[in-house]
Amino acid sequence: MISISGDAHSWQEHGLNNTEQFLAVNWCGYQRLQTKSLSRNRDQGRVDFQLIYITGGKGLFRFQDETIEVTSGNFVIYTPGQPQHYSYQAEDGTEAYWIHFTGYSAYDYLQQFGLLKQSIHTIGIIDEVIALFKKIIQELNSHMPLRGQLTTAYLLEMLTLLGRRLQSTDELGSQGRHPDINQMIAFMHEKYSDNLSISDLAGECSLSVFRFIHKFKEVTGMTPMKYITDIRMNEAKKLLSESSLHVKEVAAVVGYDNPLYFSRIFRSTVGIPPSEYKKQFL
């Protein structure tokens, strides 16, 4: 078995409850089963929270009288005092990241992020979450100043990412959000001044134009063209209020070759012509 861990305290089997900090990491680690199996039986649970993220193989988790097979891409969360009975078999090649944490706001964060609705959650493999586990382990072993504060920040980021994935899936059904839509949104914010073609964006997502527009509206609540226009108008307002650029120059910067067309779009969106808008800040 390969086992890598980082400790904020010397190991305590029943955990550690911290009521002075809002959130704190106690222990964090990674295990990969190769030749020996592993089992944990804690009838009284622990006094801290535990989150186990299966990233390879599977594990068997018993809750009351039911044993559930938890496969890769799922995580299990235990609350303080909850009995813990689980095992990994060597032949399954199980890989798992785990973290024990505490703090007077831990329960509230987990509740807010929707992580306490059930004990087992399906999220798939999220590279950013795995990277955060590795950062926490590394930081716990570094003995650098403020390591506690940094590991807390990483933990909060991790819980937020898990909550976002779960809430995104809940909002859009079992298929979840199309992974390329957010990528296209980021691209649009970066390249908003270019001549963006909806058909080209749809092609990048391997979707028809109709399906791309429909999916985009599910995620953002508006069409791709309206979204691009809103980006351009927001950037135009910033330039008009904060720079010495003339209306014609602002139009060119945000992607309009025709300043008259830009003025018409600006007026229909903002309510006044760009020239009048700029006068407010002179």
Image: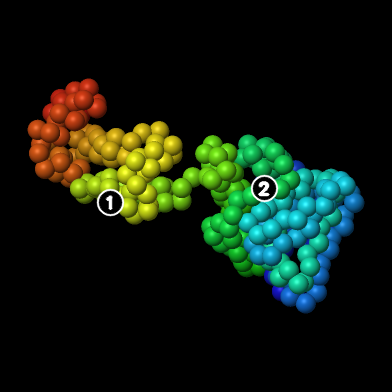
Please, is residue 37 above or below residue 124 in the view?
A: below
List the single residue furthest toward the top. Answer: 271
Picture quadrant where residue 164 is located: top right
What residue is shown at x 63% (from left), y 56% (from top)? 73
What residue is shown at x 74% (from left), y 45% (from top)? 119
Picture quadrant where residue 104 is located: top right
Q: Is residue 249 left or right of residue 23?
A: left
Q: Is residue 67 left or right of residue 218?
A: right
Regarding residue 149, the answer to whether it shows in the image is: no
Q: Position of residue 72 (x, y in %)?
A: 65, 59
Q: Which mark, residue 200?
A: 1
Q: Is residue 177 left or right of residue 57?
A: left
Q: Position of residue 180 (x, y in %)?
A: 42, 51
- From mark 2 to mark 1, how far is it between C-alphas? 36 Å
SS at badge 2: strand
SS at badge 1: helix
Disc 1: CA contacts within 10 A as few (<14), some (14-19) or many (>=20):
few
Q: Which residue is mark 2?
A: 121
